[in-house]
């Protein structure tokens, strides 16, 4: 792939979640009023050696996670409500809480059913309208705190922050540990 | 071997115990939330000579060593942990399989090894294995004769994930097996994992 100007174009936000939830099938969440921002947060641990003073001669890679920020302007409020429920580890209804301490993944694979004990991570898909590479964050959840819902005569612009982590049902992964764990890909969910 | 930074990487804790127990086969105990601390402790006795005064020894006698392995389990098999606790409490006598009997004590004065070899049905010591990942260049650690020594053994119960803070103690146990008890060449740890 050679150099070029990169334009993602208008982006449709799609979500897919727990098989027995309202977003068990790939669902349109909506369109944004401004560019979606993806922040990939690399984690590193510096190794200090006295002989190098205050700068490290070596650094350890310690994984990464991502935050995806967007402001919805044309969206499906029902789908958004389901995303909020799942962010509460599978709350029974909008506006209600999940069980305190409930795990988000519950040791299940993606979209694993099970009600409150299912896998509550959401596949966050960003689809380019002009056919450029899509983004799919396999295990994400709404994480902005506080969440804001402006209500008034003007159209509501709802800012969202998603947190994507490299979830694994088994962190040991047959001796591979985090090696190869997927944070995101460029293949949309179906 | 030249100098380098030593990184063991993530370690999986596995245990194996006596025949007929829940630990008869090598079992995964779990993963930790931070590093595993291995602390060998050699013991020595000073030999004083009047000519050297009363503070500094003229010679030191080696008196063997034990080892503490501090582990904080975060992703673990609670059934296997309960079996380790049951063995540490003398090994339950009720039934061959000690699942679910972690709070039941054996009689006071019960010997842990009983003079039997490792993994014998009457030897309550546990072989503790620390296994590095497939990508690690480091070798595993195996402590053949250990027990949970309750220093500490903390099991918090609440809304947050339970992190079990525990300590295994390894001693250089030797079975009787038709020989005298001698300390020569006793193994406190080696680098060959159980299978």
Image (tube, coloured by chain):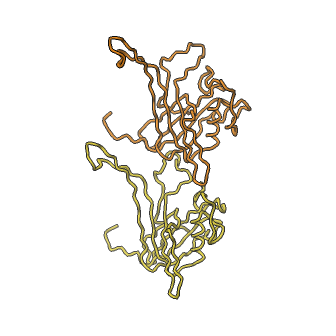
Chain colours: A yellow, B orange
Residue A189 visible within the image: yes
**In the rendering, at what x and y percent does residue B144 appear?**
54, 29
* Towards the viewer: B57 or A43: B57
User: Would residue A146 be found to the left or right of residue A114 on screen?
Assistant: left
**In the rendering, at what x and y percent does residue B114 appear?**
63, 21
User: Would residue A141 be found to the left or right of residue A100 on screen?
Assistant: left
* Towards the viewer: A132 or B92: B92
At 51% from the left and 72% from the top, the residue drawn is: A147
From the viewer's perspective, is residue A155 above or below residue B155? below
Residue that extends furthest to the bottom in the rendered view of this protein: A153
Residue A109 visible within the image: no
From the viewer's perspective, is residue B105 above or below residue A129? above
At 54% from the left and 82% from the top, the residue drawn is: A151
Q: Kindly indicate the quadrant of the structure image that contains residue A103.
A: bottom right
Q: Kindly indicate the quadrant of the structure image that contains residue B90.
A: top right
**In the rendering, at what x and y percent does residue A12 appear?**
49, 76
Residue that extends furthest to the front in the rendered view of this protein: B54
From the viewer's perspective, is residue A32 above or below residue B96? below
User: Would residue B153 be found to the left or right of residue A36 on screen?
Assistant: right
* Towards the viewer: B163 or B1: B163
**In the rendering, at what x and y percent does residue A111 appear?**
60, 62
């Amino acid at each position: 792939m050679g150099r070029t100007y990169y334009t993602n174009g208008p982006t449709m936000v799609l979500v897919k979640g727990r098989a027995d939830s309202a977003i068990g099938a790939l669902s349109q969440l909506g369109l944004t009023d401004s560019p979606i921002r993806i922040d990939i947060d690399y984690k590193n641990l510096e190794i200090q050696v006295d002989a190098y003073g205050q700068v490290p001669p070596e650094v350890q890679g310690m994984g990464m996670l991502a935050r995806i920020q967007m402001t919805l302007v044309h969206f499906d409020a029902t789908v958004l409500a389901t995303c909020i429920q799942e962010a509460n580890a599978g709350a029974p209804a909008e506006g209600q809480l999940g069980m305190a301490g409930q795990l988000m993944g519950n040791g299940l694979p993606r979209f694993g059913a099970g009600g409150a004990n299912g896998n509550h991570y959401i596949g966050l898909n960003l689809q380019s309208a002009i056919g450029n590479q899509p983004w799919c964050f396999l295990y994400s959840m709404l994480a902005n705190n506080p969440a804001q819902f402006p209500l008034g005569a003007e159209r509501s612009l709802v800012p969202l922050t998603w947190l994507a982590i490299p979830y694994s049902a088994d962190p040991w992964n047959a001796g591979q540990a985090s090696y190869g764990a997927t944070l995101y890909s460029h293949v949309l969910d179906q | 071997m030249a100098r380098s930074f030593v990184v063991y990487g993530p370690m999986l804790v596995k245990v194996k115990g006596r025949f007929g127990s829940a630990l008869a086969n090598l079992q995964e105990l779990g993963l930790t939330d931070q590093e595993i601390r291995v602390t060998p402790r050699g013991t020595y006795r000073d030999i004083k000579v009047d000519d050297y005064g009363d503070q500094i020894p003229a010679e030191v006698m080696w008196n063997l060593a034990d080892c503490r392995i501090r582990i904080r389990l975060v992703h673990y098999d609670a059934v296997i942990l309960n079996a380790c606790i049951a063995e540490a409490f003398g090994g339950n006598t009720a039934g061959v399989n000690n699942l679910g009997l972690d709070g039941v004590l054996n009689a006071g004065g019960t010997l842990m090894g009983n003079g039997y070899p490792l993994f014998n049905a009457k030897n309550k010591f546990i072989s503790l294995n620390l296994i590095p990942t497939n990508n690690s260049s480091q070798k595993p650690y195996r402590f053949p004769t250990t027990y949970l020594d309750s220093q500490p053994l903390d099991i918090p119960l609440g809304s947050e994930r339970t992190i079990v803070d525990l300590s295994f103690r390894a001693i250089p146990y030797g079975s009787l097996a038709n020989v005298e008890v001698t300390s020569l060449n006793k193994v406190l740890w080696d680098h060959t994992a159980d299978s």
